Amino acid sequence: MIILKSPREIERMRVACRMVAEILELLKSRVKPGITTSELEAFANDEARKRKAKPAFKGYCNYPSALCCSPNEQVVHGLPTVEPLKDGDILSLDFGILYDDFYGDAAVTLPVGAVDPAVTALLKATEESLYEGIAKALPDGRLFDISHAIQVYVERRGYSVVRDFVGHGIGRSLHEDPQVPNYGHAGKGVRLKPGMVLAIEPMINQYSYEVKTLDDGWTVVTNDGGLSAHFEHTVAITESGPDILTRLTSV
Ligand code: MF3
Ligand code: CO
């Protein structure tokens, strides 16, 4: 069942979502060669605490951390470690909070120091595919218009769309209906309506879309060892079009 949000509820979600955007922005400036993802995890927890917000992921299905830290071939759900990041790595950071009864959820993939131009191209295409999808988050559109726009954008550039993980509705729960795949047929899927709030999150692999989960039960990696990028926004569908709630307005 898809739970529609009133304009007032969307304004409450915007507060939580803005906090997520701010904290990701603060994290971005800390991602450099030599820093560890455990340090980023501690920082994210501190920033949530300062805002009286609860990290959304810690404890969700027993996930152990507040921040998902997924370097290089890790796709999603990577765990913080004490290993320093190296020049040329990439790092996906996925963060969510609960504030005033509502969740916000967003992710970015960042270069660590100087990365190869081919790697920059993967990050850019993944982020742009998210905006291609968001542009289809229109009242009276169909859910898979979003999915299709993402898929076409990345496959044209030779990348592949992860099948095993998808975006989701979001609101008073972190994961609500509908599931939002990053591949699909335009014109299919449920009709989009004002008041739907979706976490749209393309996970894009450099080579094959196949992934596997490591023995820790969480860390998802590419099967072939290729790189993977992930960008996510929480987006409300309004009468006048998509409203990106996790867009940074000011820190
Ligand atoms: N952004 C991801 C999601 O919405 C992060 C979830 S991590 C988990 O699915 F630990 F909470 F599962
Ligand atoms: Co999400």
Image (cartoon, grey):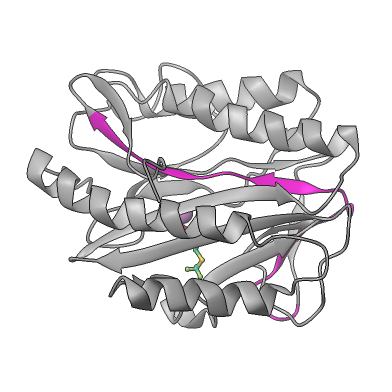
Residue 85 sits above or below residue 24 on the image: below
Horizontally, is 12 left or right of 209 in the view?
left
- Place residue 2 in its image quadrant: top left
Q: Position of residue 246 (x, y in %)?
A: 39, 45
Label count reads 0
Q: Position of residue 226 (x, y in %)?
A: 87, 48
Q: Is residue 216 magenta?
A: yes
Q: Position of residue 107 (x, y in %)?
A: 54, 51
Q: Is residue 247 magenta?
A: no
Residue shown at 59%/48% (left/top)?
A: 108
Residue 140 sits above or below residue 103 on the image: above
Residue shown at 63%/56% (left/top)?
A: 29
Question: What is the magenta range?
Answer: 215-237
Residue 15 in view (yes/no): yes
Residue 98 sits above or below residue 106 on the image: below
| Furthest residue toward front | 251
Residue 145 sits above or below residue 166 on the image: above
Horizontally, is 114 left or right of 102 in the view?
right
Q: Position of residue 50 (x, y in %)?
A: 35, 75
Horizontally, is 153 left or right of 160 in the view?
left
- Place residue 97 in its image quadrant: bottom left
Residue shown at 82%/70% (left/top)?
A: 34
Residue 176 in view (yes/no): no
Residue shown at 41%/57% (left/top)?
A: 20
Of 97 and 148, nearer the camera is 97
